[in-house]
Image (cartoon, rainbow, N blue to C red):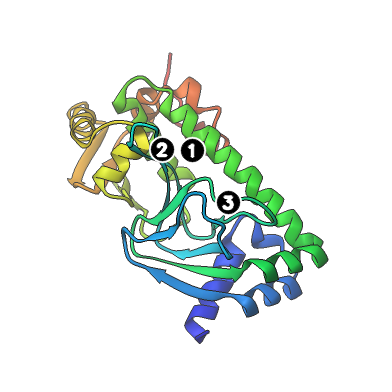
Amino acid sequence: MTGKTRKGTRLALSGSTAFSQLRPETRDALEAMCRAKSYRAGQTVIHAQEHSGFIGCVLSGILRMQKTLADGREHIVGLLVEGDTFGRVFDGAAEFTIEAATDAEFCAFPRTKFEALMTRAPDLERAILLNITNELDRAREWLIILSNQKIAGRISGFLLLLCSRFRDIDHILQPSPEGIEVKIPINRADLAHLLGTRPESISRSLHSLRDQGVIDILEPDRILIRDTKALALAADVDEIEAISTLQDLLKNHRPEH
């Protein structure tokens, strides 16, 4: 492993919510077994029902978790970003196909070595349990966002999530005097799959929010949020305030009734 990759691995493990509390010796053991892997956008990392030989931790870029429905349609059920881990330990095949949504790099830990380390490192076992809990929390967040009947509401909720859960990811957010500049980190087709709609519906809804003065469309993938309060209202603030990662963001932006 190069020095640059080892530094990236250390940052990823330190920045991961689950791995941030590992003991130094456990983190050193993980870094020693890590092998960096790079994938181009669109490449498959793990196929659904595959028994993967590694556990992964995202170093850069974005991976998408994808499910093929009975009628052949593809649906994105979640995104993995810097510091997120993926892969099943001890038992079971992958439930979803994992693909690179953008060019991405992740650290692959050999599954058998990772499992052996878990058996002798309680802090790693605890970290994996926390990661599973975080995955469940994120799944509930998506369910709340997708429950909105209006596409503009789903997009609004997604933009708010970018301002909260993704706020520590480089290049996603950029504060400005006019508001918060957000770079949508996936392409329009992936965003449509994620939100359960079509790309043209995404475009219409973004232009509707722009016409209302809630956002500006700087580029197809760059949005300036001008009015967080109005965006929360469009996303149904009473529902999305149930999402813990949004509570601080919305604390000072609750719409007046």
Question: How far across and how far down the image is residue 33, in percent?
Answer: 63, 77
Q: Residue 148 got which mark?
A: none
Question: How far across and how far down the image is residue 217, in percent?
Answer: 20, 42
Q: Residue 249 got which mark?
A: 1
Give yes or no for contact between labels 1 and 2 (Cβ–Cβ under 8 Å).
yes
Residue type at mark 2: give it. Leu
Please name the residue shown 32% across and 21% down the image.
150
Q: Is residue 147 left or right of residue 191?
A: right
Q: Is residue 72 left or right of residue 241?
A: left
Residue type at mark 1: give it. Leu
Q: Single out the residue that lies furthest toward the bottom.
A: 2
Please name the residue shown 55% across and 63% down the image.
56
Q: Is residue 29 left or right of residue 201?
A: right
Q: Is residue 122 above or below residue 225?
A: below
Q: Quadrant of residue 119?
A: bottom right
Q: CA distance from mark 1 to mark 2?
A: 8 Å
Comes first in the chain, label 1 or label 2: 2
Give the number of the mark in front: 1 or 2.
2
Q: Label 1 crowding class (10 Å Cα cut-off): few <14, some 14-19, many 20+? A: some
- Does dot 2 land on a helix, a strand or a loop? helix
Q: Which residue is mark 2?
A: 160
